[in-house]
Amino acid sequence: MRRISMAHGAGGSVMQELVKGPILSNLGGSGAEVPLEALDDSSVMSGVVLHTDSHTVQPLFFPGGDIGRLAIAGTVNDIAVMGADPIALTAGFILEEGFPFADLRKILRSMKETCSEAGVYVITGDTKVMEKGAIQEFVINTSGIGVRSSALDENVEETRKFRDVSSPWLLDSNLREGDKIIVSGTVGDHGVAILSSREGYGFETEIASDVKPLNRLITRLLQTGGIVCMKDPTRGGLSNSLNEWSEKSGTGILTKEDKIPVESGVRAACEMLGLDPLEIGNEGKLVLGVVPEKAEDVLQELRGTSEGQDAQIIGEATNRFDRVVLETSVGGKRILLPPAGDPIPRIC
Ligand code: MG
């Protein structure tokens, strides 16, 4: 009998099989404007952008954040990358019997602070407790709704000066030949920070998670214009995001390894453990597809912010290939396949 493995929840190609098989065949078919079948960051129906996310990170507290900050930022970001303003969130808490009140208060305070950073509120929720051992410590589900942002309208207007815009939303399927790919900063920080806080890994430098709500930054970028797609490269990392774009847009992507920013401590940790930083999840980074005429403007806007100071143009969409190709630092080329699962489990 086939059973669920950790890889089925890891965001890579194994999870895609589960989602595209039993989940979509039973739950698809809504006819929504952006339906479940689009497997995008959020769905859109009757003008409302809707997203949900469960958070099972271990440990609950890690350098740069905790499960509460992650739960708010993760949902805010998945709504904002569609081109929507998040307006309200829900929070469902599942606690293990015996969980310390002091930790719960700390996590709730962190959620409150992250909400005020993003300018949103939790307006409804649910609390359940399970017997000791039936669940590990604390699991949080957050859902959120958003509405079309006026900055998205400005973005569409600016983009139309250069080319036709098929969907007004920033969908994974919008990338076209010649579009530039921009990453907003160093990749791999979040996953490596989680790993470093687990027992048995004594890295020399402490790597902090990048977990952060990015909706205010996204508004600024949309006002600059020319953005056709946007993603938060979470589970499966940059590699997974680029592969989703390539597959759904039907275009190849050529990306240059030496343009992709990786923090030196993250690079060292990855080398030591045999991990690829391009496959490791981020929680405070963006990858953007931008029409070539506006790529430099978006890059400069990003570099003027604290979250985007390390931003780089890392490649472009091209019909020379039908998949994602990485040009390595030594000048060779290799196909960048989507990871089967996340190399570090339970990072979000
Ligand atoms: Mg996402």
Image (tube, rainbow, N blue to C red):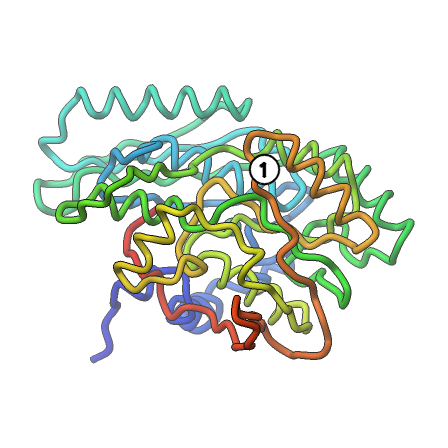
Depicted 249 relative to depicted 170: above or below: below
Quarter holding the N terminus?
bottom left
Q: Is residue 143 above or below residue 229?
A: above
Q: Position of residue 108 (x, y in %)?
A: 32, 23
Q: Residue furthest front?
A: 330
The residue where tag 1 is placed is 308
The picture places residue 76, in percent across and down from the top left corner, at 52, 36
Q: Residue at x 44, y 66 (%)?
A: 19
| Residue 21, quarter of the rendered image | bottom left
Direction from residue 293 to residue 314 in the image, left or right = left
208 on left or right of 173:
left
List x then y, in percent, for residue 172.
Answer: 63, 59
Residue at screen point 63% across, 46% down: 82
Q: Secondary structure at mark 1?
A: loop
Please tell me how crowded label 1 is: few (under 14), some (14-19), or many (20+) other residues with Cα within 10 Å.
Answer: many
At horizontal 78% and vertical 54% (from top left) the residue drawn is 291
Q: Position of residue 171 (x, y in %)?
A: 66, 55
Say which amino acid is labelled 1.
Gly
- List the single residue furthest toward the right: 161
